Image (cartoon, helix red, strand yellow):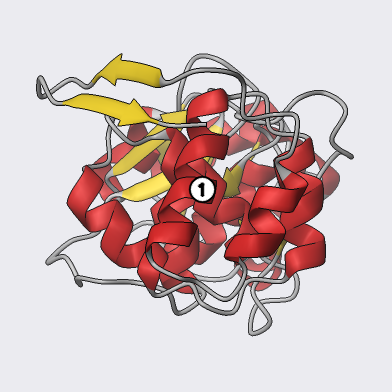
Amino acid sequence: MASTTRYTLIKNLQTAFRRGEPFDYAQLTKLGVSSALAHHYLKSGWLVRLGRGVFAFPNDTLRQEDCLKFLSHRVAGLHVGGKTALAWRGIRHNVPVREVLCLWGDEKGGLPTWFLKQFPSRYTVRNPFSSTLEKNFGLQPLPEAPGGVPVSVPERAILEMLSEVGVHEGIEETRNIMESARSLRTDILTILLKNCRRVKVVRLCVNWAQEMNLPWAVAARKAASGRLGRGRWTGRLRDGTVLVLKP
């Protein structure tokens, strides 16, 4: 291929992709770049390899938003959830020096190394909801990023966070964050609670909401009717704390 054509194609790439945005072989192919030409660009220093089949422009600072959007098209069910989703939607308690992203998805195997090196994250496939819940229910991009990665709405994020209590989330901070969630939409929360398959999550939501006298506490108990189980629920957390939840 003539050098002028190669130069034209690399200029096309620089127009097609924003600085700080990752891209892959499939995207390059659509722009007329073969695997052989991509290899040439790598050797010439016009592209750098982030991971297997994933590239960026040299000396770029990867943008978190673009990387998450890139992964959301490649990892089934990937979304920002739990404590991170609540923080992004304005519900938080403490502001950490460097936040660990709480990411959820349907595929086992975790996230690529190149992403984790740039953006410390925790990825889980432990979905607290049953298959009866409508796909992508309670997942929406942030209003300021309409084409961005899906982010759990507050009602879903609360239940995701509660499912991590004793696993990755501590009781005190979780309660503090939940106490700030005073404006949950009861219609959305009702659907999520009715489709939540974990007794621990349902009981934490109902019991703590009542203890904190949250405005949606009555609606939560009504929605959870028949899903609270019988007797006390007792579980030992990773730090040795014993959690006892009444029905």
Toward which corner of the image does residue 185 lie, by quadrant? bottom right
Q: Residue furthest bottom?
A: 144
- Identify the residue at horizontal 36%, vertical 56% (top origin): 58
- Identify the residue at horizontal 60%, vertical 32% (top origin): 105
Answer with left or right where residue 92 lies relative to residue 24.
Answer: left
- Residue 138, can we see it? no
- Identify the residue at horizontal 46%, vertical 48% (top origin): 207
Looking at the image, which is closer to me, 207 or 118?
207
In this view, 63 is above or below 200 = below
Residue position for label 1:
205
Whole-percent x, y for residue 136 in the image: 80, 45
Q: Quadrant of the N terminus?
A: top right
Q: Amino acid at mark 1?
A: Cys
Whole-percent x, y for residue 102 in the image: 41, 46
- Residue 222, can we see it? yes
Looking at the image, which is closer to me, 109 or 223?
223
Whole-percent x, y for residue 139 in the image: 72, 55
Toward which corner of the image does residue 171 lie, by quadrant? top left
Looking at the image, which is closer to me, 71 or 202?
202
Answer with left or right where residue 131 lies relative to residue 60.
Answer: right
Answer with left or right where residue 96 lies relative to residue 28.
Answer: left
Q: Residue furthest front?
A: 231
